[in-house]
Image: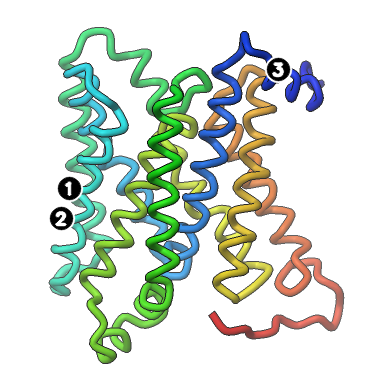
Amino acid sequence: MLEIGFLQFLADVANPQLAFLPRALVAAVLASVLCAVVGCFVVLRGMAFIGDAVAHAVFPGVAIAFALHASVLLGGAVAGAVVAVVIAVLSQRRTIKEDAIIGIVFAAAFAFGLVIISRVEGYTASLSAFLFGSLTGVSVRDLWVSGVTGAVIIALVAALRPWLTAVALDRETARAMNLPVAALDLVLYLCVTAAVVISVQTIGNILVIALLVTPASAARLFTDNLETMMVLAALIGIVGSVLGVWLAWSFDSPTGATIVLCVTAIFGLSWLFAPRRGVLRAPGRTPRKETV
């Protein structure tokens, strides 16, 4: 049974003595919107593995930042950007498939991070918050950084949408159209990196892949139009984040895991009841193709 109702949760959010709670809620919403928008291209390209890879790849940067008492966000961003560039460069050589390169690079990066963090005294509590998320780990400065970064990334994705879509649907056709496929790959990898780094503090390193893939996949069940898919994915992410923070606060459960369970439940309902593609859709209704 719920210990804290939704109205009581809203009252707690407005309570000045619980200032960390609205910060956590805003951080979760910002992360969910950014992950949902970028995640639409991740889903279209069938590259969910890249989100998991980047989430693990930021770990050495976070470990070094923790050891040096520097900004965890900055450390994760630098490490993620370096790994994104390495993956983008190596994946252009088609002798080894992209998913194999991603697997090699992210495993090595995560292992490097573990070696570094194991040499730092008193790392256990911070490591737990990094891996599983925390309601109390978000500062006002983090919110500003997340908000500005998220706005820039969303604007960049919107500006490059036609070209990113072309590469997502057919790389060879995009090359034939003389599009800079390698540069567009790098842009997408860097956008995924930014989304992951912003999400790590509330969702956690291990579960951030769910915010990238699940809302976008749920939205895909309702539409084939990319703009509509992005809006729906963002709304699903917001609803899942608000419900997740509320339930985590009520049951004293891990924030990231609770948010992931909420967005997964929304995906499950969409998979069952989506009007056009749901398993239990009305008889006689068949999926209708739309333009991306």
Which residue does the numbered mark 1 point to in the structure image? 82
Amino acid residing under circle 2: Val
Quarter occupied by residue 46 = bottom left
Q: Position of residue 106 (x, y in %)?
A: 24, 46
Position of residue 258 relative to residue 172, above or below, is above
Q: Which residue appears at 54% of the width and 36% of the height?
A: 28
Q: Please indicate whether residue 189 sits to the left or right of residue 282 in the image.
A: left
Dot 1: element: helix
Amino acid residing under circle 1: Val
| Mark-to-mark CA distance, 1 and 2 | 6 Å
Q: Please indicate whether residue 258 sits to the left or right of residue 134 in the image.
A: right
Position of residue 288 relative to residue 73, above or below, is below
Dot 2: element: helix
| Quarter the N terminus occupies | top right
Among the two numbered marks 2 and 3 on one chain, the one whose residue lies closer to the N terminus? 3
Q: Which residue appears at 47% of the width and 51% of the height?
A: 212
Q: Which residue appears at 37% of the width and 70% of the height?
A: 160
Which residue does the numbered mark 3 point to in the structure image? 12
Which residue does the numbered mark 2 point to in the structure image? 86
